[in-house]
Amino acid sequence: MMALKEFISSFLLIISWFSFAISAYLLYWTIVMPILAIIPFLLSLVFGLFCFYCSNKLGKGKKD
């Protein structure tokens, strides 16, 4: 009977650590990765706005 209690205790400990690892992994993907995804988004946004600005400047030059 004592061996069964030790087995269940060890099994529950392993399951708890596994659950903790999954929650840490999900926390990483929901918190850290969106922050890292903002950098390329902002770079492309700034590049797009710069191209738009240059296009307007060049377009105004043709009308004058």
Image (cartoon, helix red, strand yellow):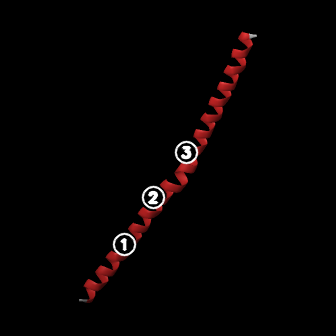
Quadrant where the C terminus sits is top right
The location of residue 45, given as percent across then percent down, is 61, 35
Q: For the view shown, which residue lies furthest in the front direction?
A: 63
Taking the spot 44% from the left edge, 63% from the top edge, the residue there is 23
Q: Is residue 8 left or right of residue 26?
A: left
Q: Residue at x 29, y 80 (%)?
A: 7
Label 2: which residue? 26
Secondary element type, mark 3: helix
Give the residue type at disc 1. Ile
Within-10-Å neighbours for mark 2: few <14, some 14–19, many 20+: few
**Residue hosting label 3:** 37
The answer to whether the residue labelled 2 contacts the one labelled 1, judged by CB atoms less than 8 Å apart, is no
Q: Give how far across and how far down residue 13 sits, in percent.
A: 37, 76
Picture mark count? 3
Alpha carbon of mark 2 to alpha carbon of mark 1: how far? 18 Å
Residue 41: x and y in percent read 58, 39
Does 16 sit above or below residue 57?
below
* Three-letter amino acid code at the position of disc 2: Leu
Q: Quadrant of residue 54?
A: top right
